[in-house]
Amino acid sequence: MQIEKYEGDRRALLPLFALADDSPTQISTYVGEGEVLVARDGDQIIGHAQITPTDDADCLELKSLAVIPARQGEGVGKALVAAVVARCRARSAGRLIVSTATADIGNLRFYQRQGFRMSRIVPDAFGPATGYPDGLLVDGIPLRDQVVFERDLGAG
Ligand SMILES: CC(C)(COP(=O)(O)OP(=O)(O)OC[C@H]1O[C@@H](n2cnc3c(N)ncnc32)[C@H](O)[C@@H]1OP(=O)(O)O)[C@@H](O)C(=O)NCCC(=O)NCCS
């Protein structure tokens, strides 16, 4: 497995973007932004990570991250986050943020295992108004609120 910058057509990565975000409307607003790293196993792309700018020049965002279901749980997601952190440090960013649903217990564990800390909650970020189906449950919890995680890139 190797991780490298992706220079191809982003449309080829839409199934991966869709794993990370239930709203095609939202995806269409950011799929072309920033830079994308991919994890490859031979010819196959098995995961992706997108880094986008924020309003704060010192802070970058891990906007989209996914590993294909058949390869989850093998350390690919962890390796992608490590590559994103290295890339953001090389770009002299001091902080990296990532957002996920408060309902997604698995992601809450995953990001904290990668050194992120919760910084704020965005109530009602997910719903019909933002392109998410009404009544969607994740782990039996209504998809409603968003948690923003932050990792300080200064410390090793
Ligand atoms: C989240 C995701 C990227 C993690 O990638 P992965 O390759 O499966 O994760 P890794 O194998 O690198 O796991 C790293 C650690 O996180 C933990 N972890 C990963 N997914 C987890 C889950 N769903 N629930 C609990 N822990 C999880 C692993 O157990 C491992 O823990 P450890 O360090 O204690 O051994 C992947 O599951 C995925 O693509 N999910 C669907 C898309 C998605 O939700 N993207 C994030 C949207 S914000």
Image: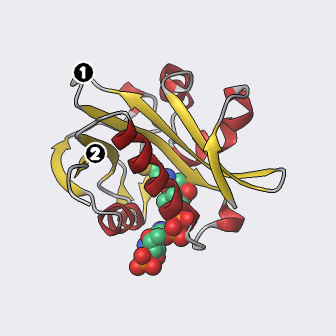
Q: Vertical placement of 11 versus 21: above or below?
A: above
Q: Residues within 10 Å of mark 1 (few under 14, many from 20)?
A: few
In the foreground, 129 or 120: 120
Task: Name the image quarter holding residue 15.
Answer: top right
Distance from Cα at disc 1 to Cα at disc 2: 19 Å
Apparent side of residue 49 relative to residue 82 in the rendered image (left or right)? right
Left or right side of 115 for 49: right
Looking at the picture, how far across and down is residue 127, in whole percent? 37, 36
Amino acid carrying label 2: it is Gln
Which quarter of the figure has residue 115? bottom left
Q: Quadrant of residue 18?
A: top right
Kind of residue sitting beneath label 1: Asp
Q: Which mark is residue 55?
A: 1
The spot of residue 44 in percent (x, y) is 80, 52
Front in this rendered view, residue 61 or 85: 85
Residue behind mark 2: 146
The kind of secondary structure element at disc 2 is strand
Q: Nearer the viewer, mark 1 or mark 2?
A: 1
Image x and y of residue 22, in percent: 52, 41
Instruction: Please say whether residue 20 is visible from this viewpoint.
Output: yes
